[in-house]
Image: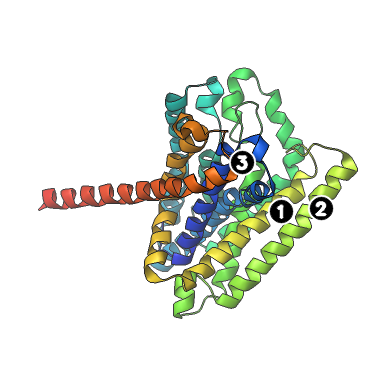
Amino acid sequence: MSQRVEGIDVARGVASLIMIQGHAYHGWVAPAHHDAAYAFTRVLGTLPLPAFLVLAGAAVVLRLEAAARRGEEPRAVRGALVKRGLTLLLIGYATNAAYALIDGAAGLHTWLRADVLHVIGLSLAIGAWVGIPARAPVDPTRFARRASLLGVALTLACPWLAPLGALAPAPLAPLVAPFVDAPPFTAMPVVPLFAWLGFGALAASWLAKHRGDDAISRRAGSSLAALACLAIAGLVLAAAAAWSTGALVAALGGPLSRAHLAVIPNVLDLVGRGLFVLSVGAALSLALPDRARAAFVTLGRGSLVAYVVHIPFCYGKLAGPLLGASDMLQATLALPFLVALSWLAVYARDALRGFARSRRAREAE
């Protein structure tokens, strides 16, 4: 999408690893073995989804910085980002179909469920449409401001918007599902999850102000001090918002849902976690040896492939005897094989792309 910043790709690679372990333990470990170690994996499992949306927002800011430097036409930039987002949405539905063919379909919602890829794709398309005016020069700061304000507005409105999805006529429920809760079609709706992309853009815009012309900034995307400040801010925000979520649920009664007022601090809690992954991952790019950093960059750039490949091995028939029947030790021993398979799938995708490019170049000669 842009002039790449390795720190963003490393952070995405870190989020991918956390995602794989979270799904593996969740899908494999039997309820009888849900001990303290398992509970820790569930805490880690809360990090990847907000992190991927935060990183998507940061990547858009980097893309817009490159577009502004090159003087690209804003309508073309916006169109390319909207197209990318809608393509990701379609890949989400294609992934649903692939999983249904592997494991069978429990109903129409298996095919049309709005899940992770759908919300990332739609958030990207909506953010580009709202944040990039067609007749004004490309401005990353304006995009970050507009996207974050829209995220705040959707989050504040979420307790009132979320119940509307259940009122949609049955034929319209799959169309409404990517935007608000429309049971049983919605897993991850734009309202309020778009906020994570908006805050990711805002964070990237702030980091850009602290980016120097030095090796650290070029690799990590900002100064080490700025990344440390962002990590601390993310932790403080997550802790304060998590406490506020619990306090609101206790005061108003539960359970926590997107129609509950406590969803507002809950969104901020997860924003903080996503910002923490962004800053720590970017800083990690400075500490990793070259080969390890290159491997994380590859995984980060192929996180979509890793996501699509690993899910059936966590929750479907491909998990075999591990599915819902393992203890923590068995799951831990099996986890490196799943990580290796997911990583190799990314390398295989890259190799196929390289082969296709070489073939086209030979044909053009």
Q: CA distance from mark 2 to mark 3?
A: 22 Å
Q: Which residue is mark 2?
A: 244
Residue drawn where x is 50% and y is 25% of the image: 111
Image quadrant in which the N terminus is located: bottom left
Q: Position of residue 340 (x, y in %)?
A: 40, 50
Q: Position of residue 30 (x, y in %)?
A: 61, 35
Q: Position of residue 31 (x, y in %)?
A: 66, 35
Instruction: Give the structural element (helix, strand or loop) at label 3.
Output: helix
Label annotation for residue 268: 1
Determine crowd level at label 1: few under 14, some 14-19, many 20+ residues with C-alpha closer than 10 A: many
Between disc 2 and disc 3, whose residue precedes? 3
Between disc 1 and disc 3, whose residue precedes? 3
For the rendered model, the colour scheme is rainbow
Determine crowd level at label 2: few under 14, some 14-19, many 20+ residues with C-alpha closer than 10 A: some
The image quarter containing residue 225 is bottom right
Q: Is residue 219 left or right of residue 356?
A: right
Q: Is residue 202 left or right of residue 211?
A: right
Instruction: Tell which of 267 and 175 is nearer to you.
Output: 267
- The answer, for residue 133, to whether it is visible in the render is no
Q: CA distance from mark 2 to mark 1?
A: 10 Å
Amino acid type at circle 2 is Ser
Instruction: Give the structural element (helix, strand or loop) at label 1.
Output: helix
Residue drawn where x is 31% and y is 51% of the image: 350
Instruction: Tell which of 45 and 275 is nearer to you.
Output: 45
Q: Which residue is mark 3?
A: 190
Q: Residue furthest left?
A: 365
Q: Is residue 176 above or below residue 235?
A: above
Amino acid type at circle 1 is Leu
Q: Is residue 98 above or below residue 220?
A: above
Count the marks: how many? 3
Between disc 2 and disc 1, whose residue precedes? 2
- The answer, for residue 248, to whether it is visible in the render is yes
